[in-house]
Amino acid sequence: MDEMNQEMSEMPNVSVGDVLTGKVVKVEDKQVLVDIGYKVEGIVPISELSSLHVEKASDVVSEGDELTLKVKKMDDEEIVLSKRAVDAESAWEDLEAKLESGEIFEAEVKDIVKGGLVVDVGLRGFIPASLVETYYVEDFNDYKGKTLALKVIELDREQNRVILSHSAVVEDENDARKHALLQDLEAGQVLDGTVQRLTDFGAFVDIGGVDGLVHISQLAHEHVDKASDVVEEGQQIQVRVLSVDRDNERISLSLKDTLPGPWDQVGEKIRPGDILEGKVRRLVNFGAFVELLPGVEGLVHISQISKHHIGTPQEVLEEGQDVKVKVLDVNEDEKRISLSIKEIEADQDRQEVEQYTKDDDGGFQLGDFIGDKLNKLK
């Protein structure tokens, strides 16, 4: 009798709601038996092992594990314990702290359900499909077993509602990267970029986490009617930074500044003495500007327009007219080319004279004719 009293006095005083520690002594399919130092072993039903669905108890615990448990129900024959209740209480406190601080943490995707993903955060955490990524995901099957960085978006204990977001983490990272990039950007830098989208007024280009605008006037050296004539979405290009507005997060870029200019190596394409076809672009009182290549114009001085005296270029030329010109001089450094229309006319006159003289060599000369007459008179 004394031994029984001593044994009873050594047993813990256990009540519903108590939290205690026990050692797993047996793992069955649908429950776990735990030694808590009481007269009977405690039972943890499979439903009380985790906030998530569990197929087998052995998926969660093993024999010899030390568990912290909460007493759910008890009588003389049985004591029912819960691991889930202890984990949930701790998890709620942890998640509430994370919601307040905005802390980023990691969790593994345990299941894919209609409308999103389920993760184990000590509770059943839910990531709605719209909060998984910053872009649309059609198939989430690859996400099972994947570890994601998350933020707590919403908590409701009464509804047992835990809403998490991975896209919020990605957006924060993008914002941080964007801020850092904006601070480092300087006018004049040449960067690699990817064309993101085209508009009527140009192209937006991603230069490493932030988009800049290449205005349509900065797409090419020549006139551009629409951006799609020059670039396409997804294309990799090099751009030069024109200006950075950090306050409004606006970046102006240029594609044409990274491309060879129309005057680059023009001396190899156009040489003095060349006869070229061009189009009259502008008439001024001292001559006519003729476009020889896209973006490259030369000047026909008024004195080189015609072999006849003229008062204004408009007397013999009009804008848009196609003309042949002779190159007199090329100055690539100063982007100046001197042209002549008169020289072509002069060259043609010389050729006609030379041809006439050549044709005359096979005939008779006037002196020959007179000499022949004199011989006959003798």
Image (cartoon, helix red, strand yellow):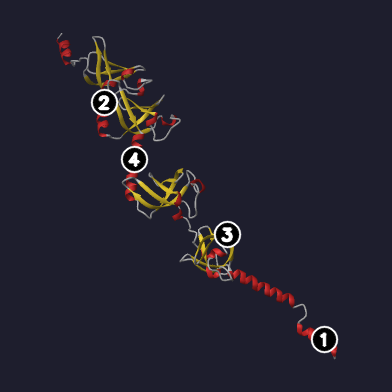
Q: Amino acid at mark 4?
A: Glu
Q: Which quadrant holds residue 121?
A: top left
**Classed neighbour count for the residue bearing mark 2: other residues with Cα under 10 Å, few (<14), some (14–19), many (≥20):** some
212 versus 342 height, above or below:
above
Secondary structure beneath label 1: helix
Secondary structure beneath label 4: helix
**Classed neighbour count for the residue bearing mark 4: other residues with Cα under 10 Å, few (<14), some (14–19), many (≥20):** few
Q: CA distance from mark 1 to mark 3?
A: 57 Å
Q: Amino acid at mark 3?
A: Gln
Residue positioned 65% across, 72% down in the render: 349
Residue receiving disc 1 = 373
Q: Which quadrant holds residue 257?
A: bottom left
Q: In the image, is 310 to the left or to the right of 135?
A: right
Q: Amino acid at mark 2?
A: Trp
Q: In the image, is 317 to the left or to the right of 219?
A: right
Give the percent coordinates (x, y) of residue 136: 43, 33
Q: CA distance from mark 1 to mark 2?
A: 134 Å
297 versus 194 height, above or below:
below
Q: Amino acid at mark 1?
A: Lys
Outermost residue to the left: 2
Outermost residue to the bottom: 378
Residue 321 is labelled as 3
Q: Earlier in the sequence, mark 2 or mark 4?
A: 2
> Closer to us: mark 3 or mark 4?
3
Of 246 and 376, nearer the camera is 376
Q: CA distance from mark 1 to mark 4?
A: 110 Å
368 versus 191 height, above or below:
below
Q: Earlier in the sequence, mark 1 or mark 3?
A: 3
